Image (cartoon, rainbow, N blue to C red):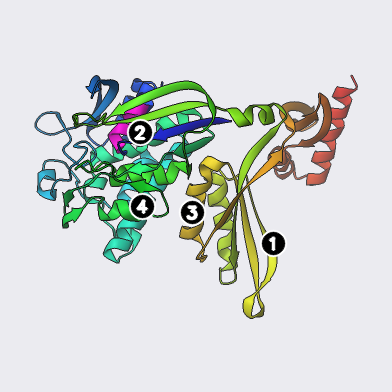
Amino acid sequence: MRIAYLDCFSGISGDMFLGALVDAGVPAPVLQQTVAELKVGARLEVSRVQRAGISATKVDVLVRGKKDRPRQNHDHEHGHHHPAPRKAAVAHGHRGLKEIRGIIAAAGLPAGVKTTALSIFEALGVAEAKIHNTSVEKVHFHEVGAADAIVDIVGAAVGAEILGVDEWVSSPLNVGGGTVVCDHGRFPVPAPATVELLRGAPVYSSGLEAELVTPTGAAIVKTLASRFASFPAMKIAATGYGAGTRDFPGHSNVLRLTVGEAASESRAAAQGEDKITVLEASLDDLNPQLFGYVMERALAAGALDVFATSVQMKKNRPGILLTVLAKPKDASRLAHLLFAETTTLGVRMREERRHVLHRRSLSVKTPWGAVRLKVASLNGSVANFAPEYEDCRRIAARRRLPLKSVMQEAVRAYLEKQNG
């Protein structure tokens, strides 16, 4: 299993995460093309810098104004928030979630990237809504909704997709210290939104007087990381260092990203074993019409499977047990989706091991067209095979044939092919 570890000994911000991605092998031109697809009047500048003697990649977001200039928000000025007035030169400095969804939807990006990016923004929205006692849809993201943070978050989603990681793990987070000035006044570090986002996460302060974890950085960790732990056992394949803007004496202001193969998983992977996260929620007050929609959203967001079991709940109410099977890296995002789309007040999560058969796809010819079959093998021998439902359904609908007849013909064609 491919694993990525975030060493947040100097916190995390959006620009630090982008820098670490590039340093670990994500092509900078791909991120630059992503920025162009967003059409928010920004571009990326990538450079090499030193932070207390450590060479790292620095990513700056330049926003269009009278002249290109580095952004001045909290993610770029790692360690300081700035009041809202300095945003006047940036078009649409305050954006709502609806507008941000539109920007991301209109960009030519893979569906998985869009889902991850929206999950990060929604995590921010939920935190801000709770702080200000309002709804997510009414939240205006202020600095977070500006072009630079949209670039950070979508770039983070693109880079995470390119790395092809199965699980993200994070260290405890050094949040820094001192105070921070934002639109709503002066607050002690960490900022209110950061505190809300990091609920349940292990945090500490090394005593450095700076804001080391920004709301954007916290939202990225909350969305991507499936757990917080010490450095995991792995066979290291790549390491990247992403630089913050400030250079602190005696302290390397960098985020380290390490990618590799989980050592404990190598044998299991060879034997067709992997880990999944099981998410469960018991529901007795969900409108049945919503279940199909929730299932579609969960599958689109990366769920491996979604199903419901009838249960008898307290006060003799009939209900359903909603179960979602997911890759560990997708568990946090899917839990957030269940909170957003159902009436549940809690989601249970546990890890389980599963043994999976090696699978391949092949195509057979039927009198009505080609049909794909999924073939599963155990120790080199075929154990199971089945025609792809969607292929058979499409032919049955187009030809006005019984679906079972199309499926039977596909099986017959496969067996005939196997027998020569």
* Left or right of 95 in this view: 403: right
Given residues 171 and 410, the one toward you in this image is 171
Residue bearing mark 4: 197
The secondary element bearing badge 2 is classed as helix
**Mark positioned earlier in the residue sequence (4 or 1):** 4
Q: Residue at x 54, y 59 (%)?
A: 347
Residue 71 part of the magenta segment: no
The secondary element bearing badge 3 is classed as helix
**Mark positioned earlier in the residue sequence (3 or 2):** 2
* SS assignment for the magenta stretch, majority: helix
Residue 14 part of the magenta segment: yes
Query: Could you tell me residue 133's position as x and y percent?
Result: 29, 66
Q: Residue at x 14, y 46 (%)?
A: 82
**Mark positioned earlier in the residue sequence (1 or 3):** 1
In this view, the mark in front (3 or 4): 4
Residue bearing mark 2: 155
Q: Residue at x 80, y 34 (%)?
A: 385
Query: Could you tell me residue 411's position as x and y percent?
Result: 84, 34
Q: Is residue 137 above or below residue 217?
A: below
Q: Residues within 10 Å of mark 1 (few under 14, many from 20)?
A: few
* Quarter of the image that includes the C terminus: top right
Q: Which residues are magenta?
A: 13-20
Residue bearing mark 3: 337
Residue bearing mark 1: 309
Quarter holding residue 388:
top right
Give the residue furthest to the bottom: 315
- Amino acid under disc 2: Gly
Q: Is residue 193 above or below residue 132?
A: above
Query: Could you tell me residue 102's position as x and y percent?
Result: 35, 46
Query: Could you tell me residue 7's position as x and y percent?
Result: 39, 34
The secondary element bearing badge 4 is classed as helix
- Amino acid under disc 4: Leu
